[in-house]
Amino acid sequence: MNLILFGPPGAGKGTQAKYLVKKLDNFQISTGEILRNEIQKNSEIGKRIVNDMNDGKFVSDEIVNTLIENILSDPMKKNRLIFDGYPRSLSQAKNLEKLLLKNDQTIDFIFFLNVKKDVIIKRIENRKIIEKRSDDDLKIFIKRYDTYMATTKPVLDFYSKNSNFYEIDGSSEIAQITAKIDNFINV
Ligand code: AMP
């Protein structure tokens, strides 16, 4: 089963993805996490993306799409993917469709965790204390949120017409969100 978790930064995609990975024995594809690892390793990709990441800007499609292509063509991960943070733009969504087709895969569920900006700001402030993420500064967060609204919203419009698209109130308790997802996937 392949799933997409969709929603603004701080909506709780990562938390739900980690739960689903265990439940379904799937793989979490968090592009943000993969990219942060590249920076930590100080790899060639890491050096190219560090400034954009720390500024709350998107990393280039070329880099992110290549990462996704490698994952989708990995036979061990076939139909076992939880997308968390990808696609984030209409061009990434279209690229994903192409790659799914090429690798004989489909998306079973798209979950949109909808949370208002003020609720997320509170969460981000807490996460900054716990995880010490350098892009969790409030000013950078607001930029990430605005970038999300500008470029990810069209993806939402694109997916919301699908019959496998479900909107969930992401401001409720973690366990409640999990229960709703469980109810939809019904496994
Ligand atoms: P996240 O952990 O999903 O909040 O992502 C953290 C940061 O990683 C984002 O603010 C972007 O700089 C970068 N990033 C993650 N996923 C993508 C993507 N699909 N396209 C472009 N940049 C991304």
Image (cartoon, grey):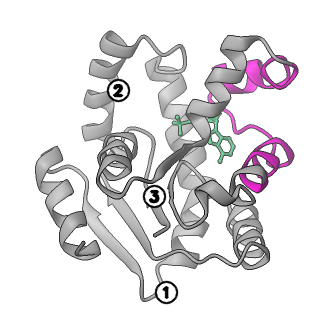
Q: Which residue is mark 1?
A: 161
161 to the left or right of 39: left
Would you say residue 118 is visible in this rendering?
A: yes
Residue at image position (39%, 41%) is: 14
Residue 117 rendering spot, x and y as whole percentages = 34, 43
- The residue range painted magenta reads 44-69
Type of residue at label 1? Lys
Mark 1 or 2, nearer chain start = 2
**Along the viewing direction, whichever of 100 and 58 lies nearer the viewer:** 100
Q: Judging from the image, what secondary structure is the residue with disc 1 in?
A: loop
29 to the left or right of 163: right
Q: Which residue is mark 3?
A: 6
Mark 3 or 1, nearer chain start = 3
1 to the left or right of 70: left
Type of residue at label 2? Ile
Task: Give the distance between the C-alpha atoms of the residues marked 1 and 2, in whole angstroms.
Answer: 30 Å
Q: Which disc is residue 96 wearing?
A: none
Q: Which disc is residue 124 wearing?
A: 2
Residue at image position (67%, 67%) is: 93
Would you say residue 88 is visible in this rendering?
A: no
**Along the viewing direction, whichever of 141 and 85 lies nearer the viewer:** 85
Residue at image position (32%, 40%) is: 15
Taking the image in four quarters, ligand 1 sits in the one at top right
Residue at image position (62%, 23%) is: 36
**Local crowd size for mark 3, using a 10 Å CA cut-off: few (<14), some (14–19), many (≥20):** many
